[in-house]
Image: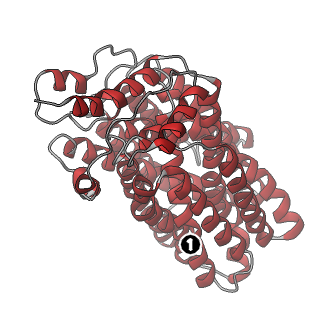
Amino acid sequence: MKTSDQAGATSAPTSIRTAIDNRSMSFYQWSTVAVCMLLNMIDGFDVLVMAFTAASVSAEWQLSGAQLGFLLSAGLFGMAGGSLFVAPWADRIGRRPLTLGCLVVSGAGMLLSAWARSPQELAALRVLTGLGVGGILACSNVIASEYASRRWRGLAVSLQSTGYALGATIGGTIAVWLLSAFGWRSVFMFGGLATLAMALLVFWRLPESIDYLLTRPHGDALLRKVNTLLLRMGLEPLQTLPPAPEKASLKTSRLRSLFSRELARPTVLVWASFFLTMFGFYFVMSWTPKLLAASGLTREQGVTAGVLLSLGGIFGTALLGVLGAKFRMHRVLALFMLIAAGLLCVFVGGSNSLAAYYVLAFLIGAFVNACVAGLYAIAPMVYDAEVRVTGVGWGIGVGRIGAIVSPLVAGALIDAQLRPTQLYLGYGMAFVAAALVVLMHRLATPESAEPVAERARIQGGSEPAPFANGRPLST
């Protein structure tokens, strides 16, 4: 039998979470999502900065396809390490402080890249930059999800994900000018300064997650902090906080908990869908400018197509979010993946018209960016607050492994004389496979009045199912 204290420990967080889930989104909540979107812009610019400067870097150091592929993968390798090993610390020290630390690391790595003296030195700095970006991405994605209501969570995370496309679009436009005026090193310098400036914005405007705060040792200071956040969202303050989790439970392996009886299957599905999607996505975003130049377009036209890929992503991720608020997210996401695969099959070689290339680039960007945004939207729903960044970080990290392999495979295939049409056809199949995996998910509708996890508790499980907000990704 539960004591009154034990009952309070479960009812208080549940009531806060329920209040956030079932109310309309306040301006403060949307502004928090906006800050997370700006953070995601760093990821977009950082990934594309190497793609946009690839031709200039390759020309200066006379790199082969395999060597250039290694450089393109170096930053992704760092991002994988950041998502796998840095991001989980946010479940221990907080989302906000980890984000600030990662911004400093990634900004420093980007700035130092401007003075790289060899491909090896640049690759090492790309890894350092990626470590910071990997931590930033996992934290910003989780914070956006935690501050959103249930109905608008998919849209909020999708809008947050448009930051990637915005960063790549704005950064790519600036990169085109900087490349022609000052050379490729100036692009890295700009990225480093912009990243450090973002740290100031985060220090000023990004709040800590209430979900995370409720897992920490409690006191009067923490109660005031939680109530301040609740008032900013237009919610009633708490009189008391529930007892903090016991220290022993906090020391339990967070990674091992991802493979508990309730979470093993959804975790495997999340990992597989992230790997396949990012394998295809990073080929498209990293190699398209260079492959289009190899197909007869000028270097500037190839970069313009790369910008259109990112510009299309703004439209695509927003569209996915709107549809995800009305229909089952996994079904909408699978449809987007199949459309992306079809577009890739007709991209290079499908027309001799420059205008057709540009239109196809925009459409491909819309759908492939939306595919990644959809995965970011559903992954946080699997895990509770104590392991959420760990779960999302590992999902993204496994996806980054696919992203690392992708440019390396493409570089080797290019050296083996495969044509661009063959490459895009092959990578399109990765999106087909991802769609099949996503269709294996069983995701509740946005309007579900009685969440599956809540039913599991009512039916008498001895321990609550570790799902976030009562909405499992799959069971």
Residue 218 placement: quadrant: top left
**Left of 256 or right of it: where is 448?**
right
Can residue 150 be spotted in the picture?
Answer: no
Residue lying at 63% horizontally and 59% vertically, measured from the top left: 46
Residue lying at 53% horizontally and 29% vertically, measured from the top left: 230
Compared with 448, 465 (above or below) is: below
**Left of 345 or right of it: where is 241?**
left
Compared with 155, 52 (above or below) is: below
- Colour mapping used in the image: secondary structure
Residue lying at 52% horizontally and 22% vertically, measured from the top left: 235
**Camera-side residue of 359 and 394:** 394
Residue lying at 67% horizontally and 82% vertically, measured from the top left: 62
Compared with 459, 217 (above or below) is: below
Q: Amino acid at mark 1?
A: Leu
**Camera-side residue of 385 and 350:** 385
Q: Secondary structure at mark 1?
A: helix
Please provide percent x and percent y for residue 47.
60, 58
Quarter of the image with the N terminus is top left
Q: How many marks?
A: 1
Please provide percent x and percent y for residue 163.
63, 43
Compared with 251, 30 (above or below) is: above
Please provide percent x and percent y for residue 298.
76, 58
Quarter of the image with the C terminus is top left
Q: Which residue is mark 1?
A: 128
Question: What residue occupies the far right of the structure in this picture?
Answer: 181
Can residue 458 be spotted in the picture?
Answer: yes
Please provide percent x and percent y for residue 337.
43, 36
Q: Residues within 10 Å of mark 1 (few under 14, many from 20)?
A: many
